[in-house]
Image (spheres, rainbow, N blue to C red):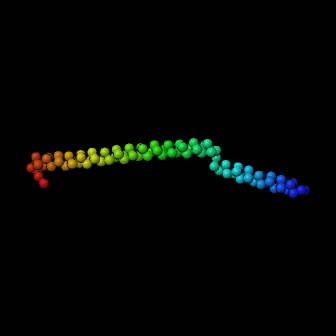
Amino acid sequence: MTNMDTATLRLDAALQRLEGALDTLLSRTGDPATTKAELTALIEDRVKLAEELDSSLARENDLQTLADEASVALGAAISEVRAALGREE
């Protein structure tokens, strides 16, 4: 066997190991187009959820303001009723 034959065999063996390693890597990561599509969908979902959270927090603040105003109005009404009944605090 010549040096060229030996080198060719070694090159073939190295290429087979490389192909095996690439197959293993690709089987773990999946199809790059699918992975990219899934990542895009996750990013879109995250943006949508962040917008919904911001909207919900703003609505919560609005409702809390209304609840505070109702509480003050209710307190005033209670005071007026007590005063009308002659039971001022």
Q: How many marks?
A: 0
Rendered-image quadrant of the N terminus: bottom right
Q: 87 or 29: which is nearer to us?
A: 29
**Which x, y percent locates residue 53?**
41, 46
- Residue occupying the far right of the picture: 1
Q: 65 or 75: which is nearer to us?
A: 65
**Which x, y percent locates residue 32?**
62, 45
Quadrant in the picture for residue 33: top right
Q: Is residue 7 above or below residue 69?
A: below
Rendered-image quadrant of the C terminus: bottom left
Q: Which residue lies at the image location 45% right of the left edge and 43% below the top edge?
A: 48
Q: Which residue lies at the image location 86% right of the left edge and 54% below the top edge?
A: 4
**Which x, y percent locates residue 28?**
65, 50
**Which x, y percent locates residue 85?**
10, 47
Q: Which residue lies at the image location 32% right of the left edge and 47% below the top edge?
A: 61
Q: 31 or 8: which is nearer to us?
A: 8
Horizontal side, residue 78 vs residue 5: left or right? left
Horizontal side, residue 82 vs residue 25: left or right? left
